[in-house]
């Protein structure tokens, strides 16, 4: 098998793997949603194209290649179905019949091997796909914004942008249109599209972090691919492009799998906030008892004012007057080192080997000392501790 075909196969198989992971992620987020079902149908067609085509090239199987072309012919219908779901209305009847008829005819032609008779089929398929995408774009951007919510309108813009960005990658699959391309990039375009769709689903802060992470992965993969290509002193530009495409497709597919597995593991081991949210505890004492079952709070120690006599509760109360959560790593907490409150807080944390002090109540003092392992000391844990402290402070005391 020549190097170009090997690179094409690897990129396509990585694209199919990434799309499969994305489909599982969408099913986990919204298993019964109508729009999710439409997206799964469209993504399933693309995944089938990439998988069948990659396996067909790798094994030299003509039937698999024909099946892949038949699935590619049906993709415009999937794109129209997704567009209807985004708009929450049907496309014009004539347009829908034209797309359905064109997809059916091209799929039958592929199955009967007409694609192997020359470039006519490729040109017809490319023209049909572009015409359908243009129709979908017209339907999306001629919509009545008032008929959709703000979130739905934002989703329409994201879908249109993603479709526009993926077009060059899709066209690279048609060798009759761009015969000079060293590698087909359709699978890579699908991976980038999935990354963008999954990243833009969160809040603004999450989107920024997601784009930075995606940019880091892309830059690292391109550097790795280009460096690997230079191991061969006779490698030309085409080989470098192929190595970069293969490395990028592999890194993006592995990244999607790692993200999906991480989310699945997190869902199976609920955090401290989820434990409290599902708890029936109604008093402060019951909540603390529930917290003690969580690994983060297993070694937590509760100290009330009567147990703080060695540290002078009056001085401690003044030092903690405007404090909710105190981190040992932040000492001296913007206070003078020689201040009595600072010295007592340092001694209290050191005596109990605590990394955090949660002020449950100020009058009388009610403190919860927690030791957070270094590997767990991340911003999410800090936020969880602050919210736990607020829940405990607002919970009523258990009456005798």
Image: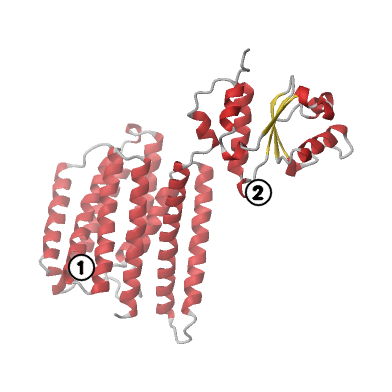
Which is more foreground, mark 2 or mark 1? 2
Foreground residue, 375 or 160? 375
**For residue 108, what is the image quadrant?**
bottom left
- Quadrant occupied by the C terminus: top right
SS state under label 2: helix
Which residue sits at x=63%, y=40%? Answer: 382
Q: Is residue 361 left or right of residue 244?
A: right
Which residue sits at x=48%, y=86%? Answer: 233
Which residue extends farthest right? 338
List x then y, in percent, for residue 347. Answer: 81, 37
- The residue that disc 2 covers is 374
- The residue that disc 1 covers is 65
Q: Is residue 361 left or right of residue 186?
A: right
Label ID, residue 129: none
What crowding class fits label 2: few (fewer than 14 Cα within 10 Å), some (14-19), or many (20 or more)? few
Q: Earlier in the sequence, mark 2 or mark 1?
A: 1
């Amino acid at each position: 098998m020549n190097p170009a075909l090997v690179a094409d196969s690897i990129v396509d198989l990585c694209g199919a793997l990434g799309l499969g992971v994305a489909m599982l992620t969408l099913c986990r987020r919204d298993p019964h949603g109508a729009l999710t079902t439409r997206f799964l149908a469209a993504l399933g067609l693309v995944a089938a194209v990439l998988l069948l085509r990659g396996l067909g090239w790798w094994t030299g199987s003509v039937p698999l290649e024909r099946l892949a072309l038949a699935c590619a012919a049906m993709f415009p219908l999937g794109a129209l179905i997704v567009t209807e779901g985004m708009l929450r209305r049907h496309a014009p009847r004539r347009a829908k019949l034209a797309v359905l008829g064109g997809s059916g005819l091209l799929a039958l032609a592929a199955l009967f091997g007409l694609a192997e008779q020359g470039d006519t089929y490729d040109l017809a398929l490319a023209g049909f796909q572009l015409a359908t995408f243009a129709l979908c774009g017209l339907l999306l951007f001629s919509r009545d914004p008032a008929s959709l919510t703000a979130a739905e309108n934002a989703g329409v813009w994201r879908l249109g942008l993603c479709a526009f960005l993926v077009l060059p990658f899709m066209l690279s699959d048609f060798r009759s249109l761009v015969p000079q391309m060293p590698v087909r990039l359709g699978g890579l375009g699908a991976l980038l599209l999935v990354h963008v769709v999954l990243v833009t689903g969160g809040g603004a802060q999450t989107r920024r972090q997601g784009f930075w992470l995606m940019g880091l992965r892309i830059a690292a993969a391109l550097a790795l691919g280009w460096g690997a290509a230079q191991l061969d002193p006779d490698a030309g530009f085409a080989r470098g492009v192929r190595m970069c495409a293969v490395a990028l497709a592999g890194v993006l597919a592995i990244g999607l799998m790692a993200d999906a597995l991480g989310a699945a593991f997190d869902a199976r081991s609920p955090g401290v906030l989820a434990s409290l949210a599902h708890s029936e505890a109604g008093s402060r004492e019951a909540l603390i008892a529930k917290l003690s079952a969580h690994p983060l709070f297993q070694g937590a120690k509760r100290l009330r004012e009567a147990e703080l006599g060695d540290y002078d509760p009056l001085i401690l109360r003044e030092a903690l007057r405007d404090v909710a959560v105190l981190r040992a790593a932040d000492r001296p907490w913007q206070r003078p080192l020689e201040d009595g409150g600072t010295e007592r807080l340092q001694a209290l944390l050191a005596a109990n080997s605590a990394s955090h002090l949660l002020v449950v109540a100020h009058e009388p003092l009610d403190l919860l000392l927690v030791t957070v392992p270094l590997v767990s000391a991340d911003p999410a844990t800090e936020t969880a501790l602050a919210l736990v402290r607020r829940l405990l402070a607002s919970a009523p005391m258990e009456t005798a």
